[in-house]
Image (cartoon, helix red, strand yellow):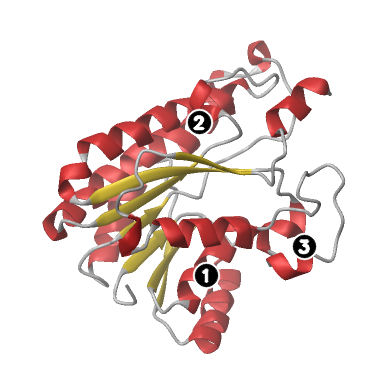
């Protein structure tokens, strides 16, 4: 597995960064996609190389733009022969609560392109190489109960995009199963702020009465699940929508507000 190559979109911060560290720790070749702040990413790559001594490659680009995806993948092929693991972590989320009628077409397309179309743009360019090796892992991100296509008040664009992505993930899993490629979706709980980059042992020092397990969720909770799904032994797990919420009814909480 250490010889595998993993691409993580939005990998410079938050859950993406914690996932980069998880795979780096295990010796993978890790490609970090990012959109901005070149110096920050350069320093991050330098820090992680020194810490884990694995190969890290930073690739700048906006995954919501088809031409950008094509340029990035062309650039990636000059560094590696293929990508074995594709983690679609990046995806815009607008914190402002607003009714669907208040969205402009530009705002709507920004959310849908970033959370749904981008997965198509990038996957179609990378899956052919996975097919050649008869091996691949694809991970997408959803939200609590997304597989039931629930309504999410004041989050219409995000909810619609992720519900569509849940179906798309399941479709990939069926179409690509014969090619040794699995596709699964992770649905994070209420993981916010600094907890996105934090480790589990730190969370165990804090009590969270709103989560049944009694502590906050962390980026490490997610990165460990992702790592497990990408192992050789996880080849029978595909088309799954996996909640990682600590037992918290995240969407129910939204409706009660």
Secondary structure at numbered mark 3: helix
Task: Identify the image quadrant of the C terminus.
Answer: top right
Residue drawn at x 39%, y 80% is 55
Measured in 3D between alpha carbons, the distance from the residue under mark 2 to the one under mark 3, in whole angstroms, is 27 Å
How packed is label 3: few (under 14 Cα within 10 Å), some, or many (20 or more)? some
26, 55: nearer the viewer: 26
Measured in 3D between alpha carbons, the distance from the residue under mark 3 to the one under mark 1, in whole angstroms, is 17 Å
The mark closer to the camera, 2 or 3, is 3
Left or right of 132? Residue 212 is right
Residue linked to disc 1: 22
Residue 74 in picture, x, y percent from top left: 25, 59
245, 40: nearer the viewer: 245
The mark closer to the camera, 3 or 1, is 3
**Does label 2 or label 3 sit earlier along the sequence?**
2
Secondary structure at numbered mark 1: helix
The image quarter in which residue 210 lies: top right
Secondary structure at numbered mark 2: helix
Left or right of 78? Residue 221 is right
The image quarter in which residue 101 lies: top right
The mark closer to the camera, 2 or 1, is 1
Residue 84 in picture, x, y percent from top left: 28, 61
Residue linked to disc 2: 162
Q: Say how many tags the image has.
A: 3
Measured in 3D between alpha carbons, the distance from the residue under mark 2 to the one under mark 1, in whole angstroms, is 25 Å
Above or below 183: residue 23: below
Above or below 86: residue 17: below
Residue linked to disc 3: 203
In the rendered structure, find residue 45 and report the number of the disc placed on it.
none
**Does label 3 or label 1 sit earlier along the sequence?**
1
Left or right of 76? Residue 64 is right
Residue drawn at x 48%, y 38% is 114
Pointer 2 with pointer 3, Cβ within 8 A:
no
């Amino acid at each position: 597995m250490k010889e595998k190559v993993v691409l993580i979109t939005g990998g410079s911060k938050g859950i993406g960064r914690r996932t980069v560290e998880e795979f780096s720790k295990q010796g993978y070749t890790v490609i970090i996609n990012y959109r901005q702040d070149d110096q920050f990413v350069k320093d991050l790559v330098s820090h992680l190389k020194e810490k884990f001594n694995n190969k890290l490659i930073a690739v700048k680009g906006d995954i919501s733009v088809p031409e950008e995806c094509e340029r990035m993948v062309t650039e990636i092929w000059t560094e590696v022969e293929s990508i074995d693991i594709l983690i679609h972590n990046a995806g815009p989320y607008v914190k402002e609560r607003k009714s669907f009628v208040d969205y402009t077409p530009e705002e709507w397309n920004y959310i849908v392109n970033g959370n749904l179309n981008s997965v198509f743009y990038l996957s179609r360019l990378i899956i052919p190489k996975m097919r050649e090796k008869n091996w691949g892992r694809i991970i997408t991100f959803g939200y609590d109960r997304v597989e039931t296509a629930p309504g999410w008040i004041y989050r219409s664009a995000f909810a619609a995009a992720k519900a569509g992505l849940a179906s798309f993930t399941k479709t990939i899993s069926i179409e690509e199963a014969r090619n040794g490629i699995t596709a699964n979706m992770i649905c994070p709980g209420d993981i916010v702020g600094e907890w996105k980059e934090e480790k589990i042992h730190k969370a165990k020092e804090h009590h969270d009465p709103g989560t049944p397990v009694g502590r906050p969720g962390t980026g490490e909770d997610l990165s460990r699940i992702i790592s497990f799904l990408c192992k050789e032994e996880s080849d029978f797990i595909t088309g799954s929508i996996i909640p990682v919420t600590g037992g918290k009814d995240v969407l129910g909480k939204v409706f009660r507000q």
